[in-house]
Amino acid sequence: MGRPSVKEQLVDRTRGVWLERGFEGASVHDLVTAAGVPKGSFYNHFPSKEHFAVEHVHRYVRTLQLEALRDAPGSAVDAVREHFEHQIAARQEGRMDAGCLLGTFSNSVTDSYPALRAAVRHGFEQWIEALTAVLSRACAAGEIPATSEPADLAAALVDGFEGAIARTRATGLADPLRVFVTVTLAEFTRRP
């Protein structure tokens, strides 16, 4: 197997820098140092730090496995629960950096970076749309109350997960993620 390209090395080794420092706090120097590549290599592949961050957002959204969520067989409620449990397990087992890149960038990017802001907004929209599709299926199957608005539930689940991630990072404890699963996910599946 050959060596990864410099572009792949840049992307693969820098997510932690973004999560730790946010968009404004991470310099190109920080990013190339983490990637172990010369600064000139960065600009050979990305015209700006913003474009590099947008590339990270696109790749991060793919790690959410939204198609698998949307196409999951069986119980729609189980699919939603398994989706979030997978997201949590990936972080706890070290397969994914702690935190959420969408949440980190949404908290640190300003209007001065419209492409990044748009990419983050689109990432959240894709996530909510996938959850909405699954929750619509759950409503139709009677797994959740028919009075529930799937798009609102989807947004609330993403917002709750983002809040749990933020509190986990602030406290260093896994409790907020456990509470998200045991309370939030249990609450939305409660039948009238």
Image (cartoon, grey):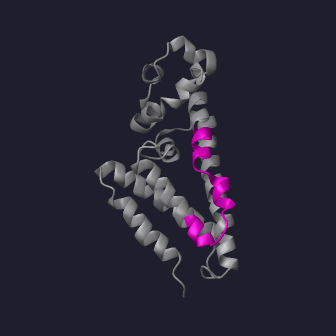
Q: Relative to 9, is 63 above or below?
A: below
Q: Quadrant of the C terminus?
A: bottom right
Q: Quadrant of residue 178?
A: bottom left
Q: Relative to 158, is 54 above or below?
A: above
Q: Quadrant of residue 63?
A: top right
Q: Nearer the viewer, residue 119 or 62?
A: 62
Number of marks in picture? 0
Which residue is located at x 46 percent, y 40 percent? 108
Q: Is residue 113 visible to us here?
A: no
Q: Nearer the viewer, residue 71 or 101?
A: 71
Chief SS of the magenta region: helix
Q: Residue furthest front?
A: 1
Q: Relative to 71, is 78 above or below?
A: below
Q: Is residue 96 left or right of residue 54?
A: left
Q: Nearer the viewer, residue 149 or 39?
A: 39
**Residue 60 magenta:** yes
Q: Quadrant of residue 73?
A: bottom right
**Magenta stretch?**
57-80
Which residue is located at x 60 percent, y 52 percent? 124
Q: Is residue 40 visible to us here?
A: yes
Task: Tell me residue 72's x, y (percent).
Answer: 66, 63
**Residue 119 magenta:** no
Task: Tell me residue 74's x, y (percent).
Answer: 65, 71
Task: Tell me residue 186's x, y (percent).
Answer: 47, 74
Q: Quadrant of the N terminus?
A: top right
Task: Tell me residue 61's x, y (percent).
Answer: 60, 45
Which residue is located at x 59 percent, y 20 percent? 2
